[in-house]
Amino acid sequence: METIQLEIKAKEYKDLSNSWKNEKYINKTLDEILKNSIFKNEKIVKTATKESIKIKIETTDSRVLDNFLNRVLNKQLIIKKLELDKNFIILEVGTK
């Protein structure tokens, strides 16, 4: 019985680990968030490095920043760095 539960937990961990480190999944997830119409008029810079993806979103509308933050935090992403200010958010998501 305990062996079966351990195997189930190990599989769940492996699946989560694979999705969190899957660069295609991470890019697709971030692109889906950024394609939302609420962000179309905002200044957004997205850069990818070997081990992470960095996004900076600048706006004077706090609702836009709040919306972005909520969307990112509700996804399965490894957040390496998060910097918040009243006019911008800088997000670094790990890919490895």
Image: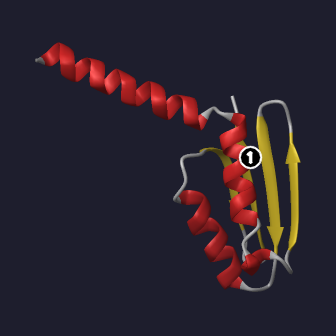
Q: Nearer the viewer, residue 7 or 62?
A: 7
- Image quadrant holding the C terminus, namely top right
Q: Position of residue 56 (x, y in %)?
A: 82, 61
Q: Is residue 24 left or right of residue 67?
A: right
Outermost residue on the left side: it is 1
Image x and y of residue 35, in percent: 76, 67
Residue at left offset 52%, top offset 59%: 74
- Give the quadrant of residue 73: bottom right
| Depicted 61 relative to depicted 25: above or below | below
Query: Looking at the image, is 61 positioned above or below residue 19?
Result: below
What x and y, as percent, mark residue 54?
80, 49
Location of residue 63 with respect to 50 vertically, above or below: below
Tell me which amino acid carries mark 1: Asn
Q: Residue 22 sits in which quadrant?
A: top right
Pointer 1 residue? 27
Give the quadrant of the N terminus: top left
Residue 91, horizontal then vertical, whole percent: 73, 54
Residue at position x 66%, y 52% from top? 29
Q: Residue at x 46, y 25 (%)?
A: 14
**For the residue carrying disc 1, how many other residues have a C-alpha within 10 Å: few (<14), some (14-19), or many (20+)?**
some
